[in-house]
Image: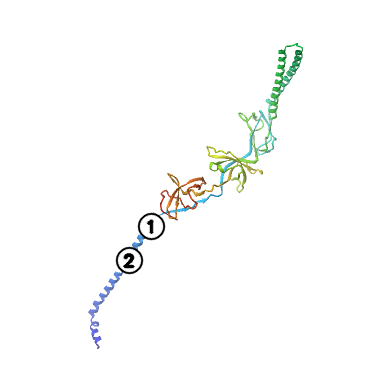
C-alpha cells in the first residue's frame, strides 16, 4: 500500500467522522439560503415602500393640481343674422262703416271675395233720410218762393225811392229781406246737398281694391252712421298683394337698421320657402318701455300665398362690429364685475375685466378686455383666483 493510501485510510474507514461532518455542511447551506431570502425580502419590502411613497406623492400632486379646459375667442362674422318675430298685415287694412243710418237691404260680397275699388258691397234702406230729403227739398222750394217775392219787392222799392216815394230806411229793409232770403236759399241748398250725399251712402262701395276679410252684417241688420259710438263695422277690407309687418328691433341693433335694407321672411307652415322684403321705414326712436325700435317691412305677395294675420320670422342681416365672440360659460361673476380667466404660457391665471356688447344666447360679444390669442378658461370654478397656477388639459 502506498503512502497516500495509508494516510487516507483512517478517514475513509472511520464512520463516526463522516457522520459528524455532513450535518455541519447542511446547516451552513441552510443559513446561507435563509440569509439570502431575508436579503431578498428586505429589498422587495424597501422597493414596495418606495413605490407606494411615489404613488402617494403623485396622487397628492395630481389632486392638488388645478386642471382647466381653455378656448380661444372667435371673430364676429361680417354679417350678423338676427331673427325677430312679426305678424303679417295687409298693406292697407280698413274697416268699412255705414255713413247713413238704416237697415241692410242686401250684401253682395262675402269673406274671401276679391273686390275692385268702387265695387258695390251692400245697400242700405234709409227711410228716415228719405223723409228728411223730401222735407229739405220742400223747404228749399218755400225759400225760393220767398226769395222771388223779396227780389220783386226790392226792385219795386228801389224805383219808388228814385222818385222819393219811400224813405231810404224802407228801401234798406226790403234789401235786407232780400239778402236774408238769399242766405236762406243757400242754407236750404246745403241741407238738400247733405241729405243727397247721405242718399248716395245707401250704397256701400269698396274704397280700394283688396279682399274682404270680415263681414259683420246680414240682411235686416240696423246700422248707424259713423265709426264711433253705436256705429257698427260692416266689412273689413285688406289689400294683400303687398303685405307689411311691424317688427320691434332691440336697442342694441337699432343703429344698424335703415330704410331700404333687405330682409328674409319665413313661415313655419311653409317650410323651405323664403320671401324677400324691404325695410320701408323705421320709427327712428327707442320705446322707453320695451327698449326697442319699431320698423315696418314691406313684403310683396303677388301670388297671394301669404295670409294677413300669419305669424312670421323676420331675418335681418346686420353688419357686425368686428369684436371678439366668446362662449357665455367663460364668464366669472364677481363682486367687482364681469371677469374672464386668461391662462398665460407659464400656466398662471390672470383675471381680466371685460365689457360685453351683444348677447347672442350661448355666446357673447366682447368689445373690450381680451385679445384674439388669449386662452380663456371654460367653465371656470368660483374658487379660481388671480395668479393661480393651473394645468391645461
Kindly check if marks 1 and 2 are in contact, taking CB atoms under 8 A apart as contact.
Answer: no
When asked about the image quadrant of residue 92, the answer is top right
The quarter of the picture where the N terminus appears is: bottom left
Q: Secondary structure at mark 1?
A: helix
Q: Position of residue 151 (x, y in %)?
A: 75, 18
In this view, the residue in front, 279 or 116, is 279
Instruction: Identify the residue position indicated by label 2 in the image.
Output: 43
Residue 298 circle label: none
User: Is residue 299 rendered to the left or right of residue 339?
Assistant: right
User: Is residue 78 rendered to the left or right of residue 380?
Assistant: right
Q: Position of residue 348 (x, y in %)?
A: 42, 53
Q: Secondary structure at mark 2?
A: helix
When asked about the image quadrant of residue 292, the answer is top right
In this view, the residue in front, 24 or 64, is 64
Instruction: Identify the residue position indicated by label 1 in the image.
Output: 59
In this view, the residue in front, 8 or 314, is 314
Is disc 2 surrounded by few (<14), some (14 to 19) or many (20+) residues within 10 Å?
few
Amino acid at each position: 500500500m502506498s503512502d497516500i493510501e495509508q494516510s487516507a485510510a483512517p478517514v475513509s474507514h472511520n464512520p463516526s467522522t463522516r457522520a459528524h461532518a455532513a450535518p455541519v455542511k447542511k446547516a451552513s447551506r441552510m443559513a446561507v439560503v435563509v440569509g439570502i431570502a431575508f436579503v431578498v425580502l428586505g429589498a422587495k419590502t424597501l422597493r414596495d415602500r418606495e413605490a407606494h411613497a411615489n404613488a402617494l406623492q403623485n396622487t397628492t400632486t395630481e389632486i392638488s393640481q388645478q386642471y382647466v379646459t381653455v378656448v380661444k375667442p372667435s371673430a364676429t362674422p361680417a354679417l350678423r343674422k338676427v331673427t325677430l318675430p312679426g305678424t303679417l298685415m295687409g298693406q292697407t287694412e280698413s274697416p268699412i262703416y255705414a255713413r247713413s243710418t238704416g237697415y241692410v237691404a242686401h250684401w253682395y260680397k262675402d269673406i274671401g271675395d276679391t273686390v275692385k275699388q268702387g265695387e258695390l258691397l251692400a245697400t242700405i234702406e234709409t227711410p228716415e233720410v228719405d223723409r228728411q230729403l223730401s222735407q229739405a227739398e220742400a223747404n228749399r222750394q218755400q225759400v225760393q218762393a220767398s226769395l222771388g217775392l223779396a227780389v220783386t219787392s226790392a226792385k219795386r222799392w228801389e224805383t219808388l225811392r228814385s222818385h222819393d216815394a219811400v224813405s231810404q230806411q224802407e228801401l234798406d229793409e226790403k234789401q235786407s229781406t232780400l239778402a236774408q232770403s238769399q242766405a236762406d236759399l243757400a242754407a236750404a241748398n246745403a241741407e238738400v246737398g247733405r241729405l243727397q250725399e247721405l242718399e248716395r251712402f245707401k250704397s256701400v262701395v269698396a274704397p280700394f281694391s283688396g279682399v274682404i276679410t270680415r263681414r259683420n252684417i246680414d240682411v235686416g241688420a240696423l246700422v248707424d252712421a259713423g265709426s264711433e259710438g253705436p256705429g257698427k263695422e260692416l266689412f273689413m277690407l285688406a289689400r294683400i298683394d303687398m303685405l307689411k309687418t311691424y317688427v320691434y328691433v332691440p336697442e342694441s341693433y337699432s343703429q344698424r337698421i335703415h330704410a331700404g335694407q333687405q330682409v328674409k321672411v319665413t313661415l313655419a307652415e311653409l317650410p323651405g320657402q323664403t320671401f324677400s322684403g324691404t325695410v320701408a321705414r323705421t320709427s327712428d326712436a327707442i320705446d322707453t318701455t320695451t327698449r326697442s325700435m319699431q320698423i315696418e317691412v314691406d313684403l310683396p305677395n303677388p301670388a297671394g300665398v301669404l295670409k294677413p294675420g300669419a305669424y312670421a320670422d323676420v331675418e335681418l342681416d346686420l353688419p357686425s362690429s368686428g369684436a371678439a365672440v366668446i362662449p357665455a360659460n367663460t364668464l366669472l361673476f364677481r363682486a367687482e364685475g364681469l371677469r374672464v380667466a386668461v391662462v398665460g404660457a407659464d400656466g398662471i391665471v390672470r383675471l381680466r375685466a371685460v365689457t360685453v356688447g351683444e348677447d347672442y344666447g350661448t355666446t357673447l360679444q366682447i368689445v373690450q378686455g381680451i385679445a384674439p390669442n388669449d386662452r380663456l378658461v371654460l367653465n371656470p370654478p368660483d374658487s379660481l383666483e388671480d395668479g393661480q397656477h393651473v394645468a391645461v388639459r
